[in-house]
Image: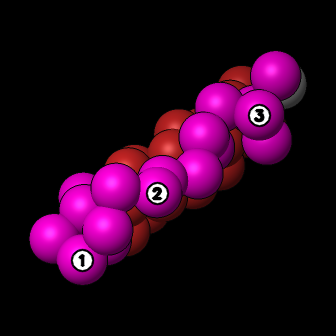
Amino acid sequence: MAKGGFNCLLFLISEIDLSVKRLKYNNKTRRPLVFCT
């Protein structure tokens, strides 16, 4: 459970980082939380 949560956190960070970079080009962003629930 802890390992899965940690991997999920890393995934969230990377997804948010990519989303922030994508915001410079368009407003469409995916919701990474779907993969963690």
Q: Position of residue 8 (x, y in %)?
A: 65, 42
Q: Where is residue 37 in the image (x, y as percent from the top left)?
A: 82, 22
What residue is shown with label 2?
28
> Which is closer to the viewer, label 3 or label 1?
1
Q: Give the range drawn in magenta.
A: 20-37
Amino acid beneath label 3: Val
Q: How many labels does the image show?
A: 3
Label 1, secondary structure: give it.
loop
Label 2, secondary structure: give it.
loop
Residue drawn where x is 34% and y is 56% of the image: 27
Distance, label 3 to label 1, CA atoms, is: 23 Å
Residue 17 can be seen in this image: no
Distance, label 2 to label 1, CA atoms, is: 9 Å
Image quarter of the N terminus: top right
What residue is shown with label 3?
34
What residue is shown with label 1?
25
- Image height check: is 37 above or below 24? above
Q: Tell me where residue 18 sits by quadrant.
A: bottom left
Q: Tell me where residue 26 sits by quadrant.
A: bottom left
Mark 1, other Cα within 10 Å: few <14 / some 14–19 / many ≥20:
few
Residue drawn where x is 77% and y is 34% of the image: 34
Amino acid beneath label 2: Lys
Amino acid beneath label 1: Tyr
- Front residue of 27/15: it is 27
Mark 3, other Cα within 10 Å: few <14 / some 14–19 / many ≥20:
few
Are the residues tagged 2 and 1 within 8 Å (C-beta)?
no
- Front residue of 26/1: it is 26
Residue 3 can be seen in this image: yes
- Image height check: is 16 above or below 21? above
Distance, label 3 to label 2, CA atoms, is: 16 Å
Magenta-colored stretch includes residue 13:
no
Q: Is residue 15 left or right of residue 7?
A: left
